[in-house]
Amino acid sequence: MSDAISFEDFTKVDLRVGTIIKVNDFPEARNPAYQLTIDFGDLGIKKSSAQITTRYAKEDLLQRQIIAVVNFPKKQIANFQSECLVLGAVDDKDVILLNPETKVKNGTAVN
């Protein structure tokens, strides 16, 4: 387990639901990854690099809702600027995406 954080620290993390609207291969990434374009409703469109190629085919990701951290600073990954962090559970180096049980409005906050 990681070091304990305060509830105040946790409330600074902005978790939102978004829908993947575009998926591209990312051959320049150090580890196999996709470039995702995600619609977060009123928050706009954001891009993310995700190492999820083992479990997910590109066509299976389109229109899938995910949960992401949207208030991290942008991160340069090879020639790509990642604007959010898509969340997943890591099971033996395989990432299983976190998502709402039923469809919700893009941009919905996760508390």
Image: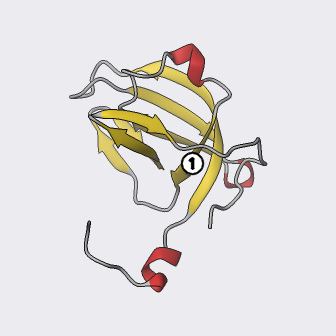
- Name the residue located 35 percent from the left edge and 80 percent from the top edge: 5
Task: Look at the picture and state if 73 lies above or below 84.
Answer: below
Say what amino acid the circle numbered 1 marks. Answer: Ile
Q: Residue at the location (48% across, 85% down)?
A: 8
Q: Closer to the camera, 74 or 25?
A: 25
Horizontal relation, residue 52 to residue 28: left or right = right
| Residue that extends furthest to the left in the rendered view of this protein | 30
The image shows residue 75 at horizontal and vertical percentages of: 34, 49
Residue receiving disc 1: 67
Circle 1 residues within 10 Å: few <14, some 14–19, many ≥20 = many
Residue closest to the eye, 68 or 42? 68
Q: Position of residue 29 (x, y in %)?
A: 27, 27
Which residue is at 45% across, 35% downward? 96
| Residue 103 left/right relative to 58 | right
* Quarter of the rendering occupied by the N terminus: bottom left
> For the residue labelled by badge 1, is the local secondary structure a helix, a strand or a loop?
strand
* Coordinates of residue 91 in the picture (x, y in percent): 33, 38
The answer to which quarter of the image holds residue 2 is: bottom left
Placement of 66 over or under 32, stated as above or below = below
Quarter residue 82 falls in: top left
Is 16 placed left or right of 10 in the picture? right
**Front residue (pair 78, 9):** 9
Question: How many numbered marks, from 0 up?
Answer: 1
Horizontal side, residue 35 vs residue 17: left or right: left
Q: How is the image coloured?
A: secondary structure
Rendered position, 67 above or below 96? below
Which one is nearer the viewer's eye here, 25 or 67?
A: 67
- Compared with 13, 65 (above or below) is above
Q: Residue at x 62, y 67 (%)?
A: 111
